[in-house]
Amino acid sequence: MKDDNLSLIGKKINEVRKKNKWKLKEIATKAEITAGLLSKIENYRAIPSLPVLNRIAIALEVPMSELVDVLKDNNSQFILVRKDEREREYRDDSKELIYESLISQNLSNYHFRTMIVTVPPNTYRKPISTEALEQVYVVSGNITYGLDDKEIALNEGDTLFFDGSIPHSVKNDSDHKVILFKIYLMHIGN
């Protein structure tokens, strides 16, 4: 898959940090940001502003150009991603879930991502929050989404749209995997 999205910066930050065996909190403190924000950036849940990215680069002791070098210029009129080209993303805050990137594209002041998420049987992912508007469509199976203090049962074919800043959990208490189609819309420059 062609890597053409800002979320790859988070992946690069994570790689550099782990290569040097630095703790998340250590880099966050040096960059004068919260460990929660750095975790969101590394796990594709937030896109850093330019000043934040610069402070992270300084904390990682690398030039900012090394972090943004992963971006590619895509001026094509369309994006085609074949099934065997989907890239898996591993997220520290959702290790049990399998994320496969379908499309990720910048649109004016927004970043748009679509993912296939596989939730293995008998899995619970603790509540997290993102800086995106999120839409979930249940392709197969049944799942429970926790939004704050509410539990929402979703069945195959159901769609849920919500503000990702609301802490949300995922629970599959069945013996079958659940397949979700997720859409993220994130404002750039927060």
Image (cartoon, rainbow, N blue to C red):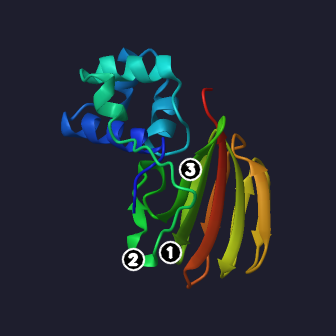
Front residue of 110/47: it is 110
Where on the picture, by quarter, is residue 29? top left
Q: Which mark is residue 136?
A: none
- Residue 33, can we see it? no
Front residue of 183/153: it is 183
Identify the residue at horizontal 71%, vertical 69% (top origin): 137
Identify the residue at horizontal 54%, vertical 71% (top origin): 119
Where on the picture, by quarter, is residue 179? bottom right
Circle 1 crowding by C-alpha within 10 Å: few under 14, some 14–19, many from 20: some
Please identify, in this view, whether the residue under mark 3 or under mark 1 is nearer the observer: 3
Above-or-below relation of 170 to 175:
above
Residue that extends furthest to the bottom in the rendered view of this protein: 175
Amino acid at the residue labelled 2: Asp
Identify the residue at horizontal 56%, vertical 85% (top origin): 176
* Residue that label 1 marks: 120
Identify the residue at horizontal 38%, vertical 23% (top origin): 56
Circle 2 crowding by C-alpha within 10 Å: few under 14, some 14–19, many from 20: few
Amino acid at the residue labelled 3: Gln
Above-or-below relation of 57 to 47:
above
Q: Quadrant of the N terminus?
A: bottom left
Circle 3 crowding by C-alpha within 10 Å: few under 14, some 14–19, many from 20: some
Q: Quadrant of the C terminus?
A: top right
Where on the picture, by quarter, is residue 19? top left
Identify the mark nearer the N-term, 1 or 2.
Answer: 2
* Residue that label 2 marks: 84
SS class, disc 2: helix
Q: Which mark is residue 105?
A: 3
Rendered location of residue 90, percent (x, y) = 39, 57
- Residue 103, can we see it? yes
Q: Is there a contact, CB below 8 Å, between mark 3 and mark 1? A: no
